[in-house]
Every structure is written in structure tokens, then in C-alpha cells.
Amino acid sequence: MADSSGPPAVPSSARIRAEALGVSFGAAPVLRGIDLTVSDGEAVALLGANGSGKSTLVKAIVGLAPITRGRVLLDCHDVVTQRRRIDFDRIGYVPQRLTAASGVPATALEVVASGLLSRGRLRIGRAGRERAIAALDQVGLADRAGESVQIFSGGQQQRVLIARALVREPSLLILDEPLAGIDAASKESLAATVADLRARETTLLVVLHEPAELGPLIDRAVVLRHGRVVHDGPMPRPAPGHDAPDHDHEHPHAGATGPTVHVPDLSVGLPAEEEMR
Amino acid sequence: MGWVVEILTTPLMQRALVVAVLVGVAAPVMGTYLVQRRLALLGDGIGHVALTGVAVGWLVGSAVGVSDAGALAVPGAIVASVVGSLMIEFVRARGKTSGDIALAILFYGGIAGGVLIITLAGGTTANLNAYLFGSIAAVAPIDIVFTAVLAVVVLGVGIGLRGPLFALCHDEEFARAAGLPVRALTVLIAVMAALTVSVSMRVVGVLLVSALMIVPVATAQLVTRSFRGTMATAMLLGLVICVTGLVLTYLYPLTPGATIVVLAIAVYAVVSIVRPLLGRRGPHGDPHPDVEDDVRVREAA
């Protein structure tokens, strides 16, 4: 069960608080009694195997998954019943996506600028354009702002989606597997972005596939297994087979002589419940 | 060039031209959002339901004894298409039935309901023909007012709320997580699509109305990079195609709806053939010139 090092002394400093949270898709329970608190200024990693409920938990936190038991508080407001009172301008969300493109061409600038909008803000305005370019600059794509995201590589599209969350200058950033399927250079660029956000005391909740990713930037790790929290505390040691000193997932071209025994998880096979939107 | 003067001085053609201009500009605006949401066939589903509305308008018109039984056809279509589009969104949101099955059911129900009700109203399916395929003769002075008001509403909403509508159609989950009023915006798109169908129905007919929303967008996106550019290009294409089609039907004995749609598809075909020849990049260009090579390979000499 959950390690009890979590709950903070002052609940009002909690940016995210899940209480006995249960999520079911139809008859299938995906989350079963999750308690999770992310305090202001913390950087928390969410770990777990495919199907453990990581993405569903993140979706429930931003109000995208059907909550069947318990509740989620975002900045002390219930994410379902008090949604209008939540200041979404302060919250950035990067969904797990394989693409930033849609049916009609859109430039990176247009996609990123759409991240400025919220309930109280329905127009982007002139200043928005400059903020969008600044956000693209943070992920190293400012020079490609006017190009269609359709021709971007997977890693570049992922960076566009991150810029779309950064453009609101959030004080709480929620990232769902931002490192899935992107190359080494993009991962380095993202780690630099995250380090920059940490320096500005942005609260982070990030779904990771490997404990080593972003390692030194993370304060606390929460591990899910079969929809329950099985660890809440320091970053856990990797499972056997993932703990060799030279084990490194950012090495797709290590060559046939490398000692790697690990089969990279491409995260393409999403658990079935995530496709049942 | 005597025929130009003739067109511009014939009251019937004047009315038809005004309607064609409004429809040509307004239809691609909502079409752009539908294509972006990958709901290109929504307009078709709404069009079919609008036919039931036309028939109900006839039924009500003959029941209350309006002099022209067709006078209530357009109001009937507006009501039915708005209700139909809301039903589609409701079914989609419930998630029990997939969007395409909901559309399919509306397709069949709309046509069958229209034919059934028009016979109950004492008419024949021949009365429906003008609405099925469009007719210039059907454009009455009152239609100009209807069309102008609806077109202004569609353009105002479609362009004025471009930011949030783009965000919704681009990534609905993100829009919800960003705190946008997703349900209200979804209903807005559905209602605007329904109004667009009602506006365009007179000229191109319910069976072809969706083509006017979708084909100019499909053509535009072959040559554009941005959402804004796609919408603007599609509006321009819609305008030119509608007016050209209408002029052709004046010069030759053709049906306006079919002429306009065939013209739109012809433009699409030409652009899709010509586009690769004018490509900015050569066929062997590197699409990601700034991405470093990840493995070293011996280049073929």
C-alpha cells in the first residue's frame, strides 16, 4: 500500500490532491482508491508499467476521465463539481499524443497559440503571437514557427505540444509521457526545458516510463501498479534488467555489440481503456 | 458579352447571385472546422435531416393553409437541421454509439422521413426535387433575407471565435483540460453547421450541400500550411466556384447544385495534379534538414 511519507502538513499548499480516487471505463476499474498529493513547488514522477493507470490518473486530474469514486482537487477545487472556479491559466497539460497534426494544416505557431485560450480568454490577440514564439523558442523551434506541424518529425511534434502548454506560463505543469518515442537530441532539449522550469519553481507532475529519465530533476516518485499506488517516496531502484550501469534507453544506435538486453517499450500499444474515449 | 448585362439585370439571377456569393463564402468556413475535426460527413447527415424539415414545413404549411405550401420549407429545414446536429453531438458525447453510425442512422432516417411526410402533406416527391438538388427558380426574395442573416451569423461566429473553435477541433481533450467551455463550443459548431446547410440548401440542394462545405477545404489544404490560410483560400474558392457554377447554369441548361459540385471537384482534381509539380521542395529534398543523422552510413557514390 501507499508509503505514508506523502501528505503535506498544510493542505492548502497542495496543487493536486486525489482522495480515494476510482476511475472505471464501463465495468473495468482502472484506478482503485488512489491517494496522491502534489504540493506547490514539487516535482513528482508517476511511474508504472503499461496499463497500470498512469495516463488515466493524469487524465482524471485534469478532468478527462470518468471519476467513479473519490475526488480530485486542483488548487483546492473539485475538478468535476467546481470546474469553473479552477484557474486553468496557471495549469499546463501535455497530453500523450503521437502527433500534433489534425485534419487541416496548422502551423506550429497556430497550435502553440491555441494553448493561450481558456474559459476567460477566447481571443489570442497580438501579444499572444509573441508569447507563442517565445514558447516555441523554449523548445528550440522558434525558427520553424510558420511551418505546418504535419511535416514535423515525431519528436518535433511532441515539442510543439509541450510549447502549447508552456505558452500559458503555468505554475503547474502536467506532462503525460513527454519522452515517449522521441530521439536523444529532443530528450536532451526537453530535460533542459524541465530544468529551466524547476529553476522557476514550477510544480511538475510527469508520467515517465523509466526512472532514469529526468532523474535528478525529480523530488518524489509515485509508482502505480494495477490501479493502486504501491510506492510514494524517493525514486525507486530500477527493476532487474533495467539496472545495469550501462543500461541506457537513449541509445537506439548502440550497435550489435552492446550488452543491452532490454527491449525498448515504444509506448504505441496504449492500454485499451485509453482508446475508449 | 451581352449575357453579363443580362445576368446582372434579371431579378431572378440577381437574387441567385447574391445567394451564391453568400453561400460560397460561408459554407467553407464551417467546412474547415468539420474537416479539422474529421467530421467531414456531418454536413451530409444534417442535410438529410433538413429534408425531413422541408417536408414538415410543407405539412405545417398545408395544415394552416398558407397560400404557398413551400413557404415554411426553409424554416422547417433550419429547425430540423439544428435538432439533427444536436442529436448527432449528443450521441457522440454519450460515446455509446460511434459518430459514423450516428451519422448513418440520420442519413437514412432523414431521407425516409422526408419522403414519408411529403406524401402525408399531400405532395409528391417531385416537390422535394428542388430541395434535393437545388434550383435557382426556388430563390424567392424572402430567401435573400434568410440567407443574408444566416450567412452573417455563420461568418461572425466562424471567424470571430476562430481561436477557441480551432483549439476544440484541433485537440478536444486539450481544449477541455485547458478549461475551455468545450460543451458550449461543440454545440455552437453543430448549430453553425446546421445553419450553413439551411443557407446553402436552396442553391445546391440538401444532397450536395456538404460538398460545398468540404471540397473547397480539401482543395485549399493541398496548397496551404496554416489553418488561417486554409480557411481564407477555401472561402475564396467557394466564392469563385459558386458564382462560376451559377453563370454556367444561366448559359447552359444545367442544374446549379450539380454544376457547382462538379466544378468544385474538377478544381480539386486539377490542383491535386498540379500541386506536386509546383512543390517547394524537389522530390529528393530532405524534409528535416536540421535533424542530425543518427547513424553513420556509407553514402552511395
Image: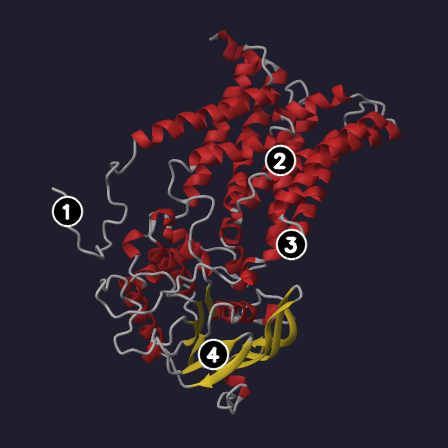
Query: Which residue is nearer to you in this view: B227 or A231?
Result: A231
| Residue at image coords 55%, 31% | B212
Q: The residue tagged with tag 2: helix, strand or loop?
A: helix
Q: Gap in Å between the C-alphas at discs 3 and 2?
A: 19 Å
Q: Gap in Å between the C-alphas at discs 2 and 1?
A: 52 Å
Whether pointer 2 and pointer 4 mark residues with C-beta atoms closer than 8 Å, the reply is no
Q: The residue tagged with tag 1: helix, strand or loop?
A: loop
Chain label for disc 2: B
Q: Gap in Å between the C-alphas at discs 2 and 4?
A: 48 Å
Residue receiving disc 4 = A223
Q: Is residue B278 above or below residue A89?
A: above
Determine crowd level at label 2: few under 14, some 14-19, many 20+ residues with C-alpha closer than 10 A: many
Residue receiving disc 3 = B93
Determine crowd level at label 1: few under 14, some 14-19, many 20+ residues with C-alpha closer than 10 A: few
Looking at the rendered structure, whether the residues under marks 2 and 1 are on a common chain is answered as yes
Residue receiving disc 1 = B299
Query: What is the number of the mark on residue B44?
Result: 2
- Which one is earlier in the sequence, the residue at label 3 or at label 2? 2
Q: Quadrant of residue B210?
A: top right
Query: Which residue is nearer to you in this view: A136 or B14?
Result: A136
